Image (spheres, rainbow, N blue to C red):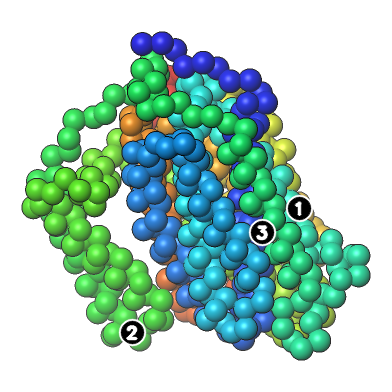
């Protein structure tokens, strides 16, 4: 076996550059989709349900894409065909979304956009593991975080910037403003262009050569899934209990998704314990059931981290416009001024994330991966909790410092903690499975946040950000259970 060659700074730059475009599209989605939904007539309590299709699609798409990208090799390579496919469809969705004539069309386009970004994004995560030797992987994920932050700064601020140049920020017909439309058009072009740059300036190792490197982690023995029925039965019982609670207490319809997800996974684990199939579904479920211990512990960290992020993305616009700008009228100048300021806040946390991406490697050298992640998550929790007390919108920029550090850390350190323990031949499918613990908390947030706000917080959306802050603090505590890799001690 031979050591995997180290890459130069510019080679790492080129291989990660596509993330600039992906995050440009993702940031436009996060900062503006709730605004588009409200403008097209959605009630604030219905917004979580409209977001559901996007993470649900990611739950299905990402392990499938990971499975097949592990087995692909053609003229474009192993991962790059998926970069291109996702980028083309994501760009088309960005161009169409601000022209959606009805609410259901916009919700469908969010589904296509999120699914397409996911098709590109998870192979990008595996791409770092494929291309970089172990000692360079933290730098590779930090570079991805830098591009995520840099792309999102511009994308999140774009409607506000366009308004400063005189582009109409309130549509005369009460529809989507031109500031949002032109921002999405630009996003489509940037997304496709950045991904094409990575495709054209990078190469991939053929599968045989990739397996020959000394940092290759051998595949684990086949998982004995004969006892998978146990978690299956537990999930089935919990799902049925949630269904009964929905009917008895007349809970929100979004909670049906939570119950349905529990029942589906319960049935799949029960099926796994009995099947003799060797097809894709059996392999993916087997890998999920038998995932490494460090991955199981990181799953809890991801669950609480991404619950917080999804709460922020769904409710910051409605929370800030209602609590600080004092309006829920989507046609008013105050609402659109507040919505634009949310774009600035999202740009700010992504800008601070780009700065944090430079500082995080220094933190890791001093404190290690685990403690660095704990510190950053606690900073993010404090930032979101501060939304409950701040009433001057400009001071919310200070809150975004903590959120930015948490965001940069969430996008890099869990993958650095995980990737050194994954089999090279299964890097894609395990990254896709790891994404379950990004998608499941998003589905959980979409299912229960509206209910929690109604029952506990008088339908005040600003409290969703407080729940997000508490969730990040819990994620920090969960991180303390994750073992520190020997190489970073």
Q: Is residue 147 visible?
A: yes
* SS type, badge 2: helix
Sequence-wise, the earlier of marks 1 and 3 is: 1
- Crowd around label 3: few <14 · some 14–19 · many ≥20 (10 Å): many
Q: CA distance from mark 3 to mark 2?
A: 44 Å
Q: CA distance from mark 2 to mark 1?
A: 45 Å
* Rendered view: 159 above or below 245: above
* SS type, badge 3: helix
Image coords of residue 430 (percent x, y): 35, 40
Residue at 58%, 31% (x, y): give it: 202
Residue at 56%, 34% (x, y): give it: 141
Image coords of residue 50 (percent x, y): 50, 75
Question: Residue lying farthest top?
Answer: 2
Image coords of residue 170 (percent x, y): 81, 80
Residue at 25%, 49% (x, y): give it: 280
Q: Nearer the viewer, residue 313 or 9?
A: 9
Find out whether the residues at labels 2 and 1 contact each other: C-beta distance under 8 Å: no
Which one is in front in this view, the residue at disc 3 or the one at disc 2? Answer: 3
Q: Nearer the viewer, residue 101 or 430?
A: 101
Which dot marks residue 154? Answer: 1
Which one is in front in this view, the residue at disc 1 or the one at disc 3? Answer: 3
Q: Which residue is mark 3?
A: 188
Say how many tags the image has.
3
Q: CA distance from mark 1 to mark 3?
A: 13 Å
* SS type, badge 1: helix
Q: Which residue is mark 2?
A: 249
């Amino acid at each position: 076996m031979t050591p995997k060659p180290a890459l130069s700074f510019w080679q790492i730059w080129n291989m990660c550059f596509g993330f600039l475009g992906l995050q440009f599209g993702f940031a436009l989605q996060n900062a503006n989709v709730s605004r588009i939904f409200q403008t097209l007539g959605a009630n604030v309590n219905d917004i979580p349900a409209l977001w559901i299709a996007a993470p649900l699609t990611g739950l299905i798409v990402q392990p499938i894409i990971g499975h097949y990208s592990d087995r692909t090799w053609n003229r474009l390579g192993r991962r790059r065909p998926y970069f291109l496919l996702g980028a083309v469809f994501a760009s088309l969705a960005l161009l169409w979304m601000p022209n959606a004539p009805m609410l259901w069309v916009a919700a469908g386009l969010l589904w296509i956009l999120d699914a397409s970004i996911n098709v590109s994004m998870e192979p990008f995560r595996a791409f770092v593991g494929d291309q970089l030797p172990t000692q360079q992987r933290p730098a590779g994920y930090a570079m991805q975080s830098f591009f995520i932050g840099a792309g999102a700064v511009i994308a999140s601020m774009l409607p506000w910037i366009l308004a400063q140049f005189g582009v109409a920020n309130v549509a005369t017909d009460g529809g989507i403003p031109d500031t949002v439309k032109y921002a999405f058009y630009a996003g489509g072009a940037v997304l496709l262009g950045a991904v094409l740059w990575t495709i054209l300036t990078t190469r991939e190792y053929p599968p045989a050569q990739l397996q020959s490197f000394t940092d290759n982690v051998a595949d684990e023995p086949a998982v004995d899934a004969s006892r998978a029925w146990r978690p299956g039965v537990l999930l089935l019982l919990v799902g049925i209990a949630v269904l009964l609670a929905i009917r008895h207490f007349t809970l929100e319809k979004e909670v049906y998704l939570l119950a349905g997800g529990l029942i589906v996974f319960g049935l799949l684990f029960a099926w796994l314990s009995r099947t003799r199939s060797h097809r894709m579904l059996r392999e993916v479920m087997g890998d999920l059931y038998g995932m490494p211990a460090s991955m199981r512990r990181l799953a809890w960290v991801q669950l609480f981290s991404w619950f917080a992020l999804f709460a922020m993305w769904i409710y910051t616009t409605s929370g800030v416009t209602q609590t600080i700008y004092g309006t829920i009228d989507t046609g008013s100048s105050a609402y659109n001024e507040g919505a634009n300021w949310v774009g600035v806040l999202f740009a700010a946390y992504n800008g601070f994330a780009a700065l944090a991406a430079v500082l995080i490697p220094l933190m890791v050298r001093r404190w290690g991966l685990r403690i660095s992640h704990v510190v950053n998550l606690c900073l993010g929790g404090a930032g979101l909790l501060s939304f409950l007390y701040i009433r001057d919108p400009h001071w919310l920029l200070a809150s975004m410092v903590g959120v930015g550090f948490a965001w940069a850390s969430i996008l890099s350190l869990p993958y650095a903690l995980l990737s050194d323990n994954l089999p090279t031949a299964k890097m894609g499918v395990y990254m896709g499975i790891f994404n379950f613990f990004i998608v499941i908390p998003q589905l959980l947030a979409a299912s229960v946040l509206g209910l929690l706000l109604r029952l506990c917080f008088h339908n005040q959306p600003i409290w969703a950000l407080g729940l997000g802050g508490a969730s990040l603090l819990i994620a920090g505590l969960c991180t303390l259970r994750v073992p520190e890799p020997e190489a970073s001690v």
